[in-house]
Amino acid sequence: MPETDLLTQLHVMASQNILGVYVLLAIAPFLQEDATVVAAASLSLGGLGNSVALFVAVGLGLTVSVLWKYWIGRAARSHKWAQRFAAKPSVEKAQKLVANRLGVSTIAARFVPGTRIPFYVAAGFFKAPWWSFAGWSVVSVVLYVGVMFALFHAVGALAGEAAVIWLPVVAIFTLLVYVAVQKLRARK
Protein backbone atom coordinates (compact mmCIF):
# COMPACT_ATOMS: atom_id res chain seq x y z
CA MET A 1 0.00 0.00 0.00
CA PRO A 2 2.19 2.85 -1.23
CA GLU A 3 -0.52 5.44 -0.50
CA THR A 4 -0.50 4.51 3.19
CA ASP A 5 3.30 4.69 3.31
CA LEU A 6 3.21 8.15 1.74
CA LEU A 7 0.59 9.31 4.24
CA THR A 8 2.65 7.95 7.11
CA GLN A 9 5.74 9.78 5.84
CA LEU A 10 3.76 13.01 5.44
CA HIS A 11 2.39 12.69 8.97
CA VAL A 12 5.88 12.24 10.38
CA MET A 13 7.32 15.17 8.39
CA ALA A 14 4.45 17.50 9.29
CA SER A 15 4.48 16.59 12.97
CA GLN A 16 8.23 17.17 13.20
CA ASN A 17 8.02 20.55 11.45
CA ILE A 18 4.51 21.75 12.26
CA LEU A 19 5.54 25.28 13.22
CA GLY A 20 7.38 25.59 9.90
CA VAL A 21 4.24 24.40 8.09
CA TYR A 22 2.17 27.12 9.77
CA VAL A 23 4.76 29.81 8.97
CA LEU A 24 4.98 28.65 5.36
CA LEU A 25 1.18 28.82 5.03
CA ALA A 26 1.26 32.39 6.34
CA ILE A 27 3.97 33.45 3.85
CA ALA A 28 2.97 31.48 0.74
CA PRO A 29 -0.12 33.57 -0.18
CA PHE A 30 2.26 36.29 -1.34
CA LEU A 31 3.29 33.89 -4.12
CA GLN A 32 0.05 32.01 -4.93
CA GLU A 33 -3.10 32.34 -2.87
CA ASP A 34 -5.21 29.51 -4.28
CA ALA A 35 -2.47 26.89 -4.12
CA THR A 36 -1.78 27.85 -0.51
CA VAL A 37 -5.43 27.46 0.45
CA VAL A 38 -5.55 24.09 -1.35
CA ALA A 39 -2.42 23.03 0.55
CA ALA A 40 -3.88 24.08 3.90
CA ALA A 41 -7.19 22.33 3.21
CA SER A 42 -5.29 19.23 2.08
CA LEU A 43 -3.20 19.20 5.24
CA SER A 44 -6.35 19.60 7.30
CA LEU A 45 -8.09 16.77 5.45
CA GLY A 46 -5.10 14.51 5.95
CA GLY A 47 -4.86 15.31 9.65
CA LEU A 48 -1.42 16.83 9.14
CA GLY A 49 -1.79 19.63 11.64
CA ASN A 50 -4.48 21.23 13.72
CA SER A 51 -7.31 22.30 11.39
CA VAL A 52 -7.97 25.51 13.32
CA ALA A 53 -4.28 26.45 13.31
CA LEU A 54 -4.03 25.67 9.58
CA PHE A 55 -7.12 27.82 8.95
CA VAL A 56 -5.73 30.70 11.00
CA ALA A 57 -2.26 30.50 9.40
CA VAL A 58 -3.53 30.56 5.82
CA GLY A 59 -6.19 33.14 6.70
CA LEU A 60 -3.63 35.44 8.28
CA GLY A 61 -1.34 35.09 5.26
CA LEU A 62 -4.15 35.83 2.82
CA THR A 63 -5.30 38.86 4.80
CA VAL A 64 -1.82 40.38 5.04
CA SER A 65 -1.30 39.71 1.32
CA VAL A 66 -4.55 41.52 0.46
CA LEU A 67 -3.77 44.50 2.67
CA TRP A 68 -0.28 44.77 1.21
CA LYS A 69 -1.80 45.04 -2.30
CA TYR A 70 -4.12 47.78 -1.05
CA TRP A 71 -1.10 49.80 0.10
CA ILE A 72 0.60 49.32 -3.28
CA GLY A 73 -2.37 51.06 -4.85
CA ARG A 74 -2.37 53.74 -2.20
CA ALA A 75 1.34 54.43 -2.75
CA ALA A 76 0.86 54.60 -6.53
CA ARG A 77 -1.69 57.38 -6.04
CA SER A 78 1.05 59.72 -4.79
CA HIS A 79 2.67 59.93 -8.25
CA LYS A 80 1.73 62.83 -10.54
CA TRP A 81 0.81 60.56 -13.47
CA ALA A 82 -1.55 58.68 -11.16
CA GLN A 83 -3.22 61.87 -9.98
CA ARG A 84 -3.83 62.90 -13.61
CA PHE A 85 -5.20 59.43 -14.34
CA ALA A 86 -7.48 59.54 -11.29
CA ALA A 87 -8.97 62.85 -12.45
CA LYS A 88 -10.43 61.27 -15.62
CA PRO A 89 -14.24 60.98 -15.55
CA SER A 90 -14.23 57.21 -16.17
CA VAL A 91 -11.78 56.66 -13.32
CA GLU A 92 -13.82 58.87 -10.99
CA LYS A 93 -16.88 56.78 -11.87
CA ALA A 94 -15.00 53.56 -11.04
CA GLN A 95 -13.83 55.11 -7.78
CA LYS A 96 -17.43 55.85 -6.77
CA LEU A 97 -18.48 52.29 -7.62
CA VAL A 98 -15.72 50.86 -5.43
CA ALA A 99 -16.56 53.22 -2.56
CA ASN A 100 -20.31 52.61 -2.72
CA ARG A 101 -20.09 48.82 -2.96
CA LEU A 102 -16.89 48.08 -1.10
CA GLY A 103 -18.17 45.07 0.86
CA VAL A 104 -19.85 43.29 -2.04
CA SER A 105 -16.95 44.12 -4.35
CA THR A 106 -14.34 42.81 -1.91
CA ILE A 107 -16.19 39.53 -1.43
CA ALA A 108 -16.85 39.17 -5.17
CA ALA A 109 -13.18 39.82 -5.97
CA ARG A 110 -12.19 36.98 -3.64
CA PHE A 111 -14.34 34.48 -5.56
CA VAL A 112 -14.17 35.77 -9.17
CA PRO A 113 -10.99 34.59 -10.89
CA GLY A 114 -8.71 37.28 -12.25
CA THR A 115 -10.19 40.16 -10.26
CA ARG A 116 -8.40 39.96 -6.91
CA ILE A 117 -5.14 41.79 -7.50
CA PRO A 118 -6.60 44.51 -9.75
CA PHE A 119 -9.42 45.15 -7.27
CA TYR A 120 -7.19 45.25 -4.19
CA VAL A 121 -4.73 47.63 -5.85
CA ALA A 122 -7.62 49.74 -7.18
CA ALA A 123 -9.18 49.95 -3.71
CA GLY A 124 -5.95 51.44 -2.42
CA PHE A 125 -5.55 53.67 -5.46
CA PHE A 126 -9.10 54.98 -5.00
CA LYS A 127 -8.42 55.54 -1.30
CA ALA A 128 -11.20 53.24 -0.14
CA PRO A 129 -11.64 53.60 3.63
CA TRP A 130 -8.86 51.53 5.19
CA TRP A 131 -10.77 50.02 8.11
CA SER A 132 -13.77 49.17 5.98
CA PHE A 133 -11.58 47.55 3.33
CA ALA A 134 -9.60 45.65 5.96
CA GLY A 135 -12.79 44.41 7.63
CA TRP A 136 -14.36 43.25 4.37
CA SER A 137 -11.06 41.63 3.40
CA VAL A 138 -11.10 39.57 6.59
CA VAL A 139 -14.72 38.57 5.93
CA SER A 140 -13.88 37.52 2.35
CA VAL A 141 -10.85 35.53 3.48
CA VAL A 142 -12.81 33.71 6.21
CA LEU A 143 -15.57 32.87 3.71
CA TYR A 144 -13.14 31.66 1.04
CA VAL A 145 -10.96 29.57 3.32
CA GLY A 146 -14.06 28.24 5.08
CA VAL A 147 -15.65 27.16 1.80
CA MET A 148 -12.45 25.46 0.65
CA PHE A 149 -11.96 23.61 3.94
CA ALA A 150 -15.62 22.57 3.97
CA LEU A 151 -15.43 21.30 0.38
CA PHE A 152 -12.28 19.32 1.04
CA HIS A 153 -13.71 17.76 4.20
CA ALA A 154 -17.10 17.01 2.57
CA VAL A 155 -15.50 15.33 -0.44
CA GLY A 156 -13.04 13.61 1.88
CA ALA A 157 -15.90 12.17 3.94
CA LEU A 158 -17.50 10.79 0.78
CA ALA A 159 -14.37 9.51 -0.93
CA GLY A 160 -12.56 8.16 2.09
CA GLU A 161 -8.82 7.83 2.47
CA ALA A 162 -8.19 8.11 -1.27
CA ALA A 163 -9.38 11.73 -1.13
CA VAL A 164 -6.35 12.66 0.97
CA ILE A 165 -4.14 11.83 -2.01
CA TRP A 166 -6.33 12.60 -5.02
CA LEU A 167 -8.29 15.69 -3.96
CA PRO A 168 -5.20 17.94 -3.71
CA VAL A 169 -3.89 16.57 -7.02
CA VAL A 170 -7.20 17.28 -8.77
CA ALA A 171 -7.46 20.74 -7.18
CA ILE A 172 -3.92 21.75 -8.17
CA PHE A 173 -4.36 20.30 -11.67
CA THR A 174 -7.57 22.30 -12.07
CA LEU A 175 -5.77 25.43 -10.89
CA LEU A 176 -2.91 24.85 -13.35
CA VAL A 177 -5.34 24.34 -16.24
CA TYR A 178 -7.12 27.56 -15.30
CA VAL A 179 -3.84 29.51 -15.20
CA ALA A 180 -2.78 28.03 -18.56
CA VAL A 181 -6.10 29.00 -20.17
CA GLN A 182 -5.77 32.54 -18.80
CA LYS A 183 -2.22 32.81 -20.19
CA LEU A 184 -3.38 31.58 -23.61
CA ARG A 185 -6.26 34.06 -23.64
CA ALA A 186 -3.88 36.88 -22.73
CA ARG A 187 -1.73 36.11 -25.79
CA LYS A 188 -4.63 36.66 -28.20
Image (spheres, rainbow, N blue to C red):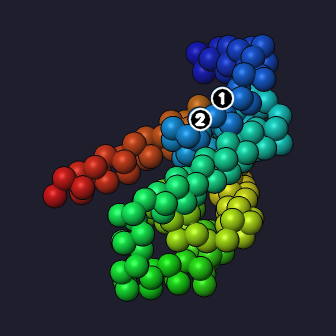
Q: Is residue 136 left or right of residue 28?
A: right
Q: Are marks 1 and 2 in contact (CB under 8 Å)?
A: yes
Mark 2 highlights which residue?
28
Q: Secondary structure at mark 1?
A: helix
Q: How many marks?
A: 2
Quarter placement of the N terminus:
top right
- Rendered location of residue 22, percent (x, y): 74, 30
Q: Amino acid at mark 2?
A: Ala
Choose between 16 and 94: the one closer to the eye.
Answer: 94
Decide if residue 146 is in sight here. Answer: yes
- Rendered location of residue 27, percent (x, y): 63, 34
User: Relative to 40, is 150 above or below?
Assistant: below
Residue lying farthest to the left in this orientation? 188
Residue at figure coordinates x 37%, y 48% from the top left: 179
User: Relative to 102, is 144 above or below?
Assistant: above
Q: Amino acid at mark 1?
A: Leu
User: Relative to 16, is 146 above or below?
Assistant: below
User: Relative to 161, is 187 above or below?
Assistant: below
- Rendered location of residue 73, percent (x, y): 51, 59
The residues bearing labels 1 and 2 have C-alpha atoms spaced at a distance of 6 Å
Quarter occupied by residue 127? bottom right
Residue at figure coordinates x 35%, y 64% from the top left: 81
Quarter placement of the C terminus:
bottom left
Mark 1 highlights which residue?
24
Packing grade of label 1 (10 A; few <14, some 14-19, many >=20) is some
